[in-house]
């Protein structure tokens, strides 16, 4: 299976166009994916790079300035891989514990990595929305592909935009996804982010995949 999240930028219509192109290319490339001839890494890189090229062409044929972030996850028997570009994130939780989190391609993300800023400062930094890489920009996108991860029952993989993680701590997110079913957890996270945004801020988008023991599903009434 595949999960995709794209957070478009460039005005209301430009951002929507860019995000739609990411979703479209992901669907097309996944449908034509041949595991016997291509690796999951090939698929992930092709989705992001192909979407970038299409968005660039859209810029040439319209007066819009479309850009987008992207997070793409591929789940196959025995392993999970993902790729990202921009400041939309991939969280991997085991229960409520954070196993890993993608590194933002943003100015604030770079300052965090260099130790020149802490998490609290990052949330209120005046340039927190400045990206260093995205799809549709002048430069080729920086595509980071994860190492393969062997999923276990109790694992959760959350793809989300900055409209969500910008208002919630990692611990809050982990607690929400560990104690609830996927749909309920998603609703709780979105509601909390909206409340803290106070009616302002960015769009909130997420996709949540939870790994469960097959036996627990068959035992449910």
Image (spheres, grey):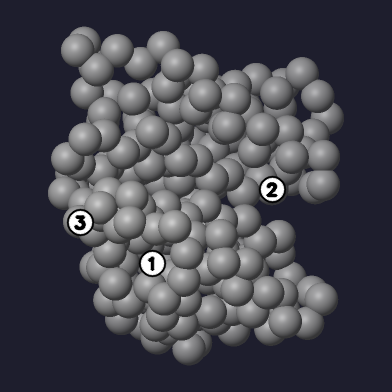
- Asked if 140 appears above or below 187 in the picture, the reply is above
| Image quadrant in which you'd find residue 174 | bottom left
Residue at left offset 52%, top offset 24%: 27
Q: Left or right: 193 with respect to 69?
A: right
Which circle's residue, 3 or 1, is located before the other in the chain? Answer: 1
Distance from the alpha carbon under mark 1 to that under mark 2: 20 Å
Distance from the alpha carbon under mark 3 to that under mark 1: 31 Å
Residue at left offset 69%, top offset 83%: 196
Q: In this rendered view, identify the residue nearer to me: 113 or 69.
A: 69
| Image location (x, y in percent) of residue 65 | 74, 38
- Helix or strand or loop: what does disc 1 sit on? helix
Q: Nearer the viewer, mark 3 or mark 1?
A: 3
- Asked if 191 appears above or below 171 in the picture, the reply is above
| Image quadrant in which you'd find residue 124 | bottom right
Distance from the alpha carbon under mark 2 to that under mark 3: 35 Å
- Res. 215 visible in picture: yes
| Image location (x, y in percent) of residue 202 | 71, 64
- Asked if 156 appears above or below 51 in the picture, the reply is below
- Helix or strand or loop: what does disc 2 sit on? strand
What number is the disc on residue 110? 1
| Image quadrant in which you'd find residue 43 | top left
Residue at left offset 41%, top offset 76%: 179
- Helix or strand or loop: what does disc 3 sit on? loop
On the image, numbered disc 2 is attached to which residue? Answer: 9
Q: Nearer the viewer, mark 1 or mark 2?
A: 2
On the image, numbered disc 3 is attached to which residue? Answer: 152
Which circle's residue, 1 or 2, is located before the other in the chain? Answer: 2
Q: Nearer the viewer, mark 2 or mark 3?
A: 3
Q: In this rendered view, identify the residue nearer to me: 90 or 66.
A: 90
Q: Residue furthest front?
A: 221
Which quadrant does the N terminus fall into? top left
């Amino acid at each position: 299976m595949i999960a995709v999240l794209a957070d478009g930028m460039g005005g209301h219509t430009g951002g929507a166009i860019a995000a739609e192109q990411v979703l479209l290319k992901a669907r097309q490339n996944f449908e034509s994916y041949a595991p016997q001839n291509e690796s999951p890494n090939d698929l992930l890189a092709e989705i992001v790079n192909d979407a970038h090229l299409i968005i660039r062409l859209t810029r040439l044929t319209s007066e819009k300035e479309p850009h987008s972030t992207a997070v793409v996850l591929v789940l196959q028997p025995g392993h999970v891989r993902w790729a990202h570009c921009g400041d939309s994130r991939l969280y991997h939780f085991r229960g409520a514990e954070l196993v890993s989190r993608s590194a933002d391609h943003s100015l604030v993300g770079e300052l965090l990595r260099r130790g020149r800023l802490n998490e609290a400062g990052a949330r209120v930094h005046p340039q927190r929305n400045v990206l260093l890489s995205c799809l549709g920009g002048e430069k080729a996108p920086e595509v980071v592909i994860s190492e393969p991860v062997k999923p276990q029952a109790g694992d959760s993989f959350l793809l989300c935009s900055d409209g969500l993680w910008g208002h919630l701590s990692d611990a809050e997110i982990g607690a929400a996804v560990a104690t609830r079913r996927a749909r309920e957890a998603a609703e709780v996270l979105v509601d909390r982010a909206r409340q803290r945004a106070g009616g302002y801020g960015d769009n909130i988008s997420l996709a949540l995949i939870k790994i469960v023991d097959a036996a627990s599903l068959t035992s449910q009434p």
